[in-house]
């Protein structure tokens, strides 16, 4: 058994990571926002340590890490969405940049065996070919810029030898515990409940990767040799358009989804080409995604049906990028 700290544990990614680590028999500690909604953790809260700490406040972060002395840290905390106001941008910097720096500073105080930073494909910016890790970052969104800044902090810590860090850049993650406002979740709920969806104009594409594959890659990265200081893409290498994703959900559910195409405005991250080059993940982690899009959607539909999520709500969908 190892002591593991997971930040952003109350979120979509975090809820899945915490459960996977519990399944492996680890001692799991969940760092959550003081004002965070813990609905995803209610079923397991007696099995984990929950710590309400603001990552932007360095002293409490250092106090928690030095007290717990975790062997491995998974940093999943991130301010998502597209920041359009000054307050939103300040919160994104506080969480994504300062929060990561504070956590690295705390990790320097203990014998941390591995620090896994889960970044985002939005750090790259759009290109007309598969995104590989050697590309210069050219983010077109504020969120992508803050995640790229966090990556630089992690790389610096790895280079100076103070924290053994590896950065995983996830692409468009979907699956269990996904927020109801996100693309795949909204599409599934429309299929199950007969809701209507507003969609962006045709042609936007993403690399959709199932959460179980992202978790598995991260667990491998937490122990693999020769990955410290590396950036590794976690996607499928296959891109799917928004409209084809809708058709795939229809195929899995047997339902017909009423779509209003072109009625939702595009966002800065929308592009006609977006997929991962995953050669490096195969070479360094011996990892490839195990779930096809069809299988991943089937798992997601089963989860929504088990949870009995409210159905029939109208969804706004733009198919935005990495988690």
Image: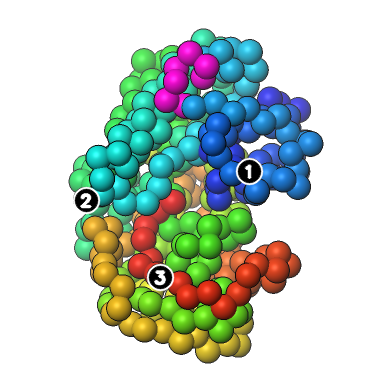
In three-dimensional space, the C-alpha distance between marks 1 and 2, rounded to whole angstroms, equals 31 Å
Q: CA distance from mark 2 to mark 3?
A: 22 Å
Q: Is residue 172 left or right of residue 153?
A: right
- Element carrying mark 2: loop
Residue 323 included in the magenta stretch of the image: no
| Magenta stretch bounds | 55-61
| Residue 186 position in % (x across, y down) | 50, 70
- Lower position in the chain sequence, tag 1 or tag 2: 1
Instruction: Please tell me whether mark 1 or mark 2 is closer to you in this view.
Output: 1
Residue occupied by mark 2: 140
Any magenta on residue 59? yes
Q: Which mark is residue 56?
A: none
CB under 8 Å between discs 3 and 1: no
Please give the residue where the numbered disc 1 appears in the rendered image. Answer: 38
Q: Height in image: 41 above or below 199?
A: above
For label 1, the SS is loop
Q: Is residue 88 left or right of residue 282?
A: left
10 Å neighbourhood of mark 3: few (<14), some, or many (≥20)?
many
Q: Is residue 9 above or below residue 239?
A: above
Residue beneath the point at 28% across and 79% down: 262
When asked about the image quadrant of residue 19, the answer is top right
Q: Residue at x 27, y 62 (%)?
A: 267
Look at mark 3 in the image and give the residue it sits on.
Answer: 316
Callout 2 environment at 10 Å: few (<14), some (14 to 19), or many (20+)? some
Residue found at x 50% / y 39%: 76
Q: Are marks 1 and 2 in contact (CB under 8 Å)?
A: no
- Residue 25 percent coordinates (x, y): 77, 36
Residue sitting at x 28%, y 58%: 269
């Amino acid at each position: 058994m190892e002591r593991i700290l997971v930040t952003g544990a109350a979120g979509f990614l975090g809820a899945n990571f915490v459960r996977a680590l519990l399944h492996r028999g680890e001692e799991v500690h969940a760092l959550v926002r003081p004002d965070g909604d813990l609905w995803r953790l209610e079923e397991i809260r007696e099995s984990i340590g929950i710590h309400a700490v603001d990552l932007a406040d360095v002293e409490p972060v250092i106090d928690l890490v030095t007290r717990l002395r975790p062997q491995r840290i998974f940093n999943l905390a991130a301010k998502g969405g597209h920041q359009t106001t000054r307050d939103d941008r300040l919160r994104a910097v506080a969480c994504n940049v300062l929060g990561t720096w504070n956590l690295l500073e705390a990790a320097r105080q203990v014998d941390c065996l591995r620090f896994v930073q889960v970044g985002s494909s939005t750090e790259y910016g759009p290109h007309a070919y598969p995104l590989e890790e050697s590309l210069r970052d050219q983010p077109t969104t504020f969120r992508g810029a803050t995640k790229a800044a966090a990556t630089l902090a992690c790389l610096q810590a790895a280079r100076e030898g103070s924290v053994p860090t590896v950065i995983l850049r996830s692409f468009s993650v979907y699956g269990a515990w996904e927020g109801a406002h996100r693309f795949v979740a909204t599409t599934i709920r429309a299929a199950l409940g007969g809701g209507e969806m507003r969609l962006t104009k045709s042609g936007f594409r993403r690399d959709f990767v199932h959460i179980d594959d992202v978790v598995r890659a991260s667990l491998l990265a937490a122990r693999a040799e020769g990955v410290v200081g590396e950036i590794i893409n976690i996607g499928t290498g296959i891109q799917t358009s928004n409209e084809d994703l809708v058709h795939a959900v229809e195929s899995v559910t047997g339902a017909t989804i009423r779509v209003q195409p072109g009625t939702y405005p595009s966002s800065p991250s929308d592009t006609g080409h977006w997929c991962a080059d995953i050669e490096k993940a195969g070479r360094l982690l011996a990892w490839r995604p195990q779930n096809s899009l069809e299988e991943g959607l089937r798992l997601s539909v089963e989860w929504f049906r088990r949870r009995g999520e409210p159905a029939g709500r109208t969804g706004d969908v733009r198919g935005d990028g990495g988690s």
